[in-house]
Amino acid sequence: MDSNHAPHYDVGDEMEIDLRPGRDRKGGTTTNAMHSGSPRIESGSHVPTAARPSERCGRCFRRKCVRVTFRLINLGFAAVFLSSAILQYNDDDGIAWAALYFMAAVFCILSELSWRHLRTFLVLPTLWMFTLCSWIGAGYVLIAQLLVGHAEGGASGEDAMDFYGLLLVSFWMSIVLLLDRHNVVGVFRGYTSLTEHERDREGHVQMGEVVI
């Protein structure tokens, strides 16, 4: 074998193995000479290796479980928001609230489709924020009044239900936007801007494998 084309193995940042023929002290030829400047591997020494297949499988399984759980919760919120939009047909201001819940459901669905340019559309969370501020300014968020009104079933009870619905929408939209903003969704759900092949290759490279 040509010494210039002998295999070369990279086993980590600590050491490299060069299998080009070398000379021992007696002039004989060896096949495990170390690359110049690299530490020599002694018998019984520990060589860094990639993660075991079982560890990789367990890690991928846990990530997939969390990803599926998050998707189910998100789709559940989308169903709740759609149901709330349908139930607004008999209210005086039902059109406004139906549009509110419908847009929240669309937001959850778009987040599942990975439409990042629409998912990060900041007009929707801004709408929830200013609507919530207007309720605070109008005095509708007095918790004691809302609880009493809801228990009595009076007019303020309807206001309480609307307010709680608005809080629920704001809470879940904030969670989805926050996770997407810091790319935690990429950790929990395994979603990034990379393609499927690029994500697999990135995961193997981080584990010490070389994927072509």
Image (spheres, rainbow, N blue to C red):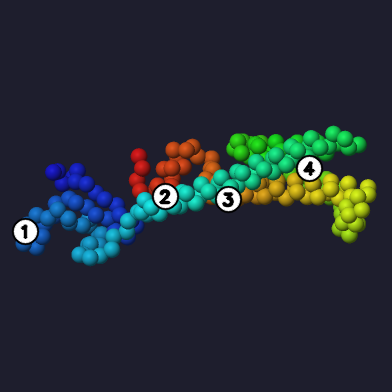
CA–CA distance in space, label 3 to label 1: 58 Å
Q: Are marks 4 and 1 in contact (CB under 8 Å)?
A: no
Task: Using a 10 Å C-alpha cutoff, classify the residue at mark 4 as few (fewer than 14 neighbours), some (14 to 19) or many (20 or more).
Answer: few
CA–CA distance in space, label 3 to label 2: 21 Å
- Is residue 192 in view from this perspective? yes
CA–CA distance in space, label 2 to label 1: 48 Å
Task: Using a 10 Å C-alpha cutoff, classify the residue at mark 2 as few (fewer than 14 neighbours), some (14 to 19) or many (20 or more).
Answer: few
SS at mark 2? helix
- The quadrant in which residue 55 appears is bottom left
Question: Mark 4 sits on what residue?
Answer: 127
- From the viewer's perspective, tell me whether residue 121 is left or right of residue 43: right
CA–CA distance in space, label 2 to label 4: 43 Å
- Which label lies toward us, 4 or 1? 4
Three-letter code for the amino acid on which mark 4 is drawn: Leu
Three-letter code for the amino acid on which mark 1 is drawn: Gly
Which x, y percent locates residue 73?
64, 46
CA–CA distance in space, label 4 to label 1: 81 Å
Compared to residue 62, the image places residue 84 above or below, namely: above
Residue drawn where x is 34% and y is 46% of the image: 210
Task: Using a 10 Å C-alpha cutoff, classify the residue at mark 3 as few (fewer than 14 neighbours), some (14 to 19) or many (20 or more).
Answer: some
- The quadrant in which residue 191 appears is top right
Q: Which mark is residue 184?
A: 3
Question: Mark 1 sits on what residue?
Answer: 27
SS at mark 4? helix
Residue drawn where x is 65% and y is 41% of the image: 75
SS at mark 3? helix
> Which residue occupies the foreground of this view, 127 or 168?
168
Q: Are marks 2 and 1 in contact (CB under 8 Å)?
A: no
CA–CA distance in space, label 4 to label 3: 24 Å
Mark toward the start of the polypeptide (3 vs 1): 1
Question: Mark 2 sits on what residue?
Answer: 57
